Image: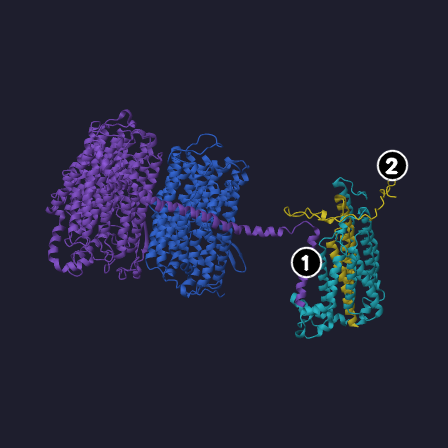
Chain colours: A cyan, B blue, C purple, D yellow
Amino acid sequence: MIAIATIPPHELPKWYEIVLTSPFAWAIGLVMVGLWLILPRGNARGRWFGALCGIVAIGLLAWHVPRLCGWLDESVFDGLAITVVVACGATISVRNPLYSAIWFGLALVGTAGLFLLIGAQFLSVATITVYAGAILVTVLFVIMLAQPEGHAYYDRLSWEALLSAVTGTILVGMMTSVIGHATSGAPLPGERTPGMALEIIHPRGSDRLASVSVAAAGIAEEDREAGILAEEHVAGFGRELLGRYLIAMQVAGALMLAALVGAMAIVVHGRRTDGRQAIRIGNM
Amino acid sequence: MHGSMLGPEQLLLIAIGLPLFGAALIVVHCRPDGRLFARQSALVTAILTLLAAGWLLVQFSNHGTEPFAATDLDWFSDPSGIHIRFAVALDGLSAWLFGLSALLVVTCVLVSWEAIQDRAPSFYAMLLLLETGLLGVFAARDIILFYIFFEFTLIPLFFLIGIWGSEQRRYAAIKFFIFTLIGSLLTLLGLLVLIIWNSQHPAPGRPAELTFSIPDLTASLQAAAAAGDGIPVAVQIWIFGALFAGFAIKVPLFPLHTWLPLAHTEAPTAGSVLLAGILLKIGTYGFLRFSIPMLPEATAVLMPTILWLAVAGIIYGAFVALAQSDIKRLIAYSSVSHLGFCMLGLFALNPLAVEGGALQMINHGLSTGGLFACVGMLYERYHTRQIRDYSGMARKLPILAFFLVIFTLSSIGLPGLNGFAGEFLLLVGAFQRAFTHPALDWGWQLKLIAILATLGVVLGAWYMLWLIQRTFFGPLKEPVRDDIKGPVRDLSFREIAALVPLVVLIVWIGIQPQAFLAPMRPALRDTTSMATVAYERGPQLAEVDWNIHP
Amino acid sequence: MSDWTTIQKLLVAIPALPLVATMVTALLGPRYLRGKSHLPIVFGLVISCVLSLELLRQLNRAIENHETGIGYETTVDLWTWASVPEAYDGSGSRKTIGDSTGRLITDVHDASDSSGPFHIAVTLRADGLTCIMLAMVTLVALLIAIYAVGYMHQDRGCWRFFTYIGLFVFSMTMLVSASNFVLLYVFWEAVGLCSYLLIGFWYEKREAAAAGTKAFLVNRVGDFGFALALFFIWTVYGTLNFHDTQNAPGVLGQERLSSMQQEFGRPGESGEGHPRGAQDQDVRTGYVGGGIGLAICLLLMLGACGKSAQFPLHVWLPDAMEGPTPVSALIHAATMVTAGVYMVARCTPLFAVDCAPYLDPRAVVATIGGLSALIAGIIAMTQNDLKRVLAYSTISQLGYMFLALGTGSLVGIIAGMFHLFTHAFFKSLLFLGAGSVMHAMGGVIDMRKFGGLRRLMPMTFWTFLAGALALSGIWPLAGFFSKDAILAAAYDVGHGEAAYASLFLWLTYAAFLTAFLTALYTFRAFYMTFFGAEEIPAEAGHHARESRPIMTVPLVILALGALAVGWIFGQPGATKSGFAGVAASTPSLAVMVHPGYRALDTAAERKSAAERKSAAEKKSAAEKGSVAEKGLHQDSHRRVAIISLVLAVLGIGIAGFLYLGDAREVRAIIQWPVMKQLHRISYGKFFFDPVYWILVVLPGLALASICYAFDRWLIDGLVNTIGRIPSGIGRLFRNMQCGMLQTYALWMLLGVLTLLGSAVWHMW
Amino acid sequence: MAEAELDLLQNYLTVGAIVFMLGVVGLIARRNLIVMFLCAEMMLQGVSITLVAFSRFHNDWGGQMLVVFIIAVAACEAAIALALILMLYARAGKLDAAYWQEMREENVPPYIDREVPLERLEERRWPDLAPAGVAPEINEEEQSHRSHV
């Protein structure tokens, strides 16, 4: 991909030759097909084939993404990334909401791992405890409360499976390609620097992006050590959280209180107005 | 003016403000079903306004200097140099129309005495609001003020037609409102372009200032035109087109007239009397006040087109009127035809024709106002407007027949009544314009236009007399009146009182038009002199460069 | 007011009295006067008639001791009707007064550069023509009003009738005394209005209402032409006043007439004795000829035809008989229909102008007159309705008057006016006679339904006989003198060297034939009504007897008039004070008294004739010119008089042969091949009504419905479709709101996709 | 070294994008309210990954701070959303998102699933749990007859 980018533009073969030959395009295509197939579409077959396409696509993508230098980092990152992606894919496709909740739990764990890898230890732990622990458990409760005994028909159906799959995939394709070009700093075909691309969208913003990509690469390793990757990560995190973002934290607290009160109000209000017994437990 | 409290200036302000005050009084004071008090106070207000307007006119016609009873208050001005002034005054063009509006409102109140049963207070409030709008339009000397009143007249009439109309009233009200609104927006655009152009290209020796007052704008534009560097003809034509859109819809010029018959047939009697009597004149008044004086070259260049539209209006209006089966719709199309005469007069750019056109505006107000009042009274008694339902009504309603015949004769231009005075001057002027040195090669066109217009007079007589013959003469056949109880009585004293002033004026203008022409002459002369000069100089169409370069 | 001369005072009083009487009747009529509502009108008319006779006497005295200028006229200004300064732009650049044929009157230069005002004042004038007409109108109106008292007394709306009669007399008196074209036009239409109101007096009758509207509309068509003529006159001459005013010389003012008269007197050059065209004529003082001159005359003639029911526009007069009979007598026999003749006589100088390349307007007038006379005569032969017969005979006699005016010679014009004067008497007599018959027969006027009334109604019988004889032109009665004068004038022009001599010859023969027909149909009606077996229709009921004295007395007076008028006024001896003398004193006619004036010479003929007979011509012209001195009768007319008398007697005899007894012969004659067709055409009134209905009325109504459909579907349709466009677009997007939550999310996603896509596309 | 940071960033951003996208597709496609909610949570996770990646790349705590707040908000959202879902379930009797579509324009036809997939027999039935804290009333007749042994 990078090789192609360095060829002077006028000799570039037609854009569809690029697309057909580049693995990234194939990955996108496969994801599209896979996603469409795995989504629950009534009693349609081909869910396994969809999963297969998905796996192949992930492989291609992994190949497309630039390799990290250390092989240890590389393998750990790949493992975690693949777990997260597969888990998320499964969450969507699995027919039974309970299983999708559990798959989502796995995804959260994978994410926590990724956070650890990048040096956000507090967040990884927070994700596990708050996100997986609290939110997911509540979801499980609700599933338990609201889940009819058999498989509901609406779990086997999906709304506009093809269109959403295609759109979602194109969205991802575009984002990843942009990320690819922006970070690679390589001139895009037609001598357009990434800055210039942005310039078309937002004239004054382009120089800042250019500076960002150069400067970031240029952050010295030692300041990074002093900053994000400092030893006492949580202390730094705490200093930041209760320093600069103190007010924000208080507001978040107030927000959570409001949410709590809101939730209770909904339930109470729900029971009184509609007259029927609020929750008929499981006798559908 | 002498310093006494009631100088003309104060009187003019009172005349304009009184109806507003009356409307407010009615709305505040009346219970929704308080019909009696509402109509009495409306009548008192209308009569007081009429007295004020009448006194003003008497003073004006005796020794009125040009901007008579002028009041010029600084109304809205911000440091960036825009001063919108509350400038109000009467002059030759607007004096008689001012008086006519006051008179017709009194007639309307009297006519709708019994006709309006439900929600009478708001009806009379709307009527008085409309009167303020009308008086304001004719007295405004500032463009923005003019435009405010110009739009303001639409709203009450929209409600008058929309609420108290007959079957299709909503459709008619909406169509009328939107049709006129679009036009007036274009007019505002044209006016603004004029103002801005004037502020950027001042005539030599005049300060370049953004003025909204009509006399200054006209003076500076004409000075620029006289000095030779006025607005280039192509731009003038575009501005003229914008102004034309708004005013031509108000005057129903031929292709833009379809809202008129609908609005007339559906409006209540008072609504259609005012609509026909005064509101159509705002269009011609607009042409006379803005298009002709401020855009002389464009008027000269576009004169044949507008004359063709006017004549088309006359002949087409007459023929369509011939084919009508609904009395009010027939009279509506007849006013399309008569307004065609006014436009012919104004745009024939001949001193005689212009005075005839201006007089015809007033005549049409009186005669068609009267006609609609009579038809309204007939409708009040029989609740049907179809011609075939009536026959030989003269036997049953002799006084109504007498008044209707008088108004019909006045509208078909019978000599000795007002219609003839206006039409004769108008046609003589148009004829003279056509047969003496027509510019360029328009000679045969103008000749044909003059002759066709005179033919319009014959057609006018045809449909009106045929209407009278079918409804009022012949053996008596009254339409079935199941829903109305009690015998049909002829005109009551109130109804006669509503019509008599109109008849008196009709006969007076017929016998002595000079008394009405003299006060208008100076104002008419200098509004149309530039356009006449531009026309006689012969607008060399060839060298009009049509592309606009900013 | 005080400084007015007696003539001016009389002039204002004569129309004022009927106006006041009308106001009184109108205001007090319905409640108070009711039965006696005729009193104010009759009283007003009596005084007005006396005043008009006094005016005539004053005028005679004024004419005697009046030397300066052409003819005698006095005007009185009441108030300014309209005055627009600088309306007539007399600026030099008036070169392009183009006329339709493109012949520009290029060299019309305008002496004074100041542009004259359009000044119209309500001014009345007294001159020979006006006073005669005033006298005739008021006298006849008085007699008819008295008659109408008896005729209309049992009618509920008689106050309305007398109001309209008063209004009519006021309008007619103002019409004849108006001194500018606008005032003439105003009362021209006012008279039309009164005839509309009076024809439609019994508005319950559907035919009466329709006849009233028809009359007004046909008059309106005539007035359309008259209005165009007015506009031409204003555009060309810069003034519409007859008399001279300080701003501009009047159209028939002294200044213009004197300059015209100098034209006659100028010997040699392009032929003497004829007002040359306006090529080199100063428009401010002379007359414009050529296309414009002809156009003015033809349009004036169109107006006259509309009002006097001549050939193209005569269809309304027979239908106008729907009105009460006194109306037909007053308006449709004596006064209103003669307005056209009066106007053409008044505008003689305009008609006398030379329109060289085109045909001469007077020839057109004469032809229309002759044609109308002949056609009306033929139609009257087969009508069964007594009033319709008299209506067609009126059209015929009016045709005679126009023929006389068309001859263009002073003799002819005065003969025409004299015929108008006498015709008023005997025609209103005949109409009133028919009215009294109708009154007796309970409203039936169809001659076939009644007969042999001579013993039943002796007074009506004898007066009707007098009228019939006068109409047919039997020697001692008025008809003979006036009709003979016309025939003589036409005969002269026919045999003279004028340009249209041959045309006039034919017209003279037609006139003789019409004279014969007149006698024939008049006595046909007379015999069918008063002779044969006595037959009373059922409608007559019990009161079929002679009318009451209030109706028969006017009949007798009119009969005496028919007898005496011709004798008194037609005599040659009545020099200056005689009818001819007074009439000739009118400025527009006096201009022709000049010896040099000859009738109907066009430029071409004049050139060739000038050299050969200039001396002889001058002598005979002078002799002819001085007609005022020798009255109407010359030896050369003896022959014409004898022929017309013989024809009249012949007509009466044949009518007697045909219609006395049981008219078997008539039924036989009708079967003859030629006569059968002629009868069908004549009975069908030459099918003018159906032709006009098909050519004018139907296309009008068709066009009306087409325009209305066009208006409703196309223009309104267009407006409505434009109105419906926004709602259409709105409906399009409405369907997107399908209520499914996820669809909205999907639309949002697509939105993000397109945005991002465009960004990436640029980068890409 | 700088090159690695860029690569690290790109990888993380890719993963974040994919997770986010799957969340979006899930939200749109799935009809079950709870699964939709889960997909919403998944979208938040995708964003968190991206934020952390940028925080690392720019050596700035801001990113991680925001993730904390995202988690806080997610918690609140979960509370409210689940309460709503329960109410909807109580009202509708089922968790189908398509049930709630009255908010459409009046002349637009409602969306009706054309062919509802058959209930697959082998799906096991969940045990009937008695309402917590209430003594289960014993139904003798059913005790004796065990239908699906």
Q: Give the amino acid type for the residue marked by disc 2 in the picture.
A: Glu
Left-right relation of C100 to B67? left
* Front in this rendered view, residue C567 or C6: C567
Position of the C terminus of chain C, as image quadrant, is: bottom right
Nearer to us: label 1 or label 2: 2
Residue drawn at the location 47% of the way across and 51% of the way down: B249
Report which residue position mark 1 lands on.
C750
* Front in this rendered view, residue C609 or D3: C609
Distance between the alpha carbons at the discs numbered 1 and 2: 58 Å
Residue B497's spot in the image, x, y percent?
41, 37
Q: Residues within 10 Å of mark 1 (few under 14, many from 20)?
A: some
Position of the N terminus of chain C, as image quadrant, is: top left
Helix, strand or loop at label 2? It is helix
* Front in this rendered view, residue B176 or C366: C366
Q: Give the amino acid type for the residue marked by disc 1 in the picture.
A: Leu
Number of labelled discs? Answer: 2
Q: In which quadrant of the rendered view does residue C554 lie? A: top left
Relative vertical location of residue B155 with respect to residue B436 in this rendering, above or below: above
Residue D141, numbered circle: 2
Residue A231's spot in the image, x, y percent?
85, 66
Helix, strand or loop at label 1? It is helix
Residue B166, numbered circle: none
Residue C307's spot in the image, x, y percent?
28, 44
Residue furthest to the right: D144
Residue D109: in sight, yes or no? yes
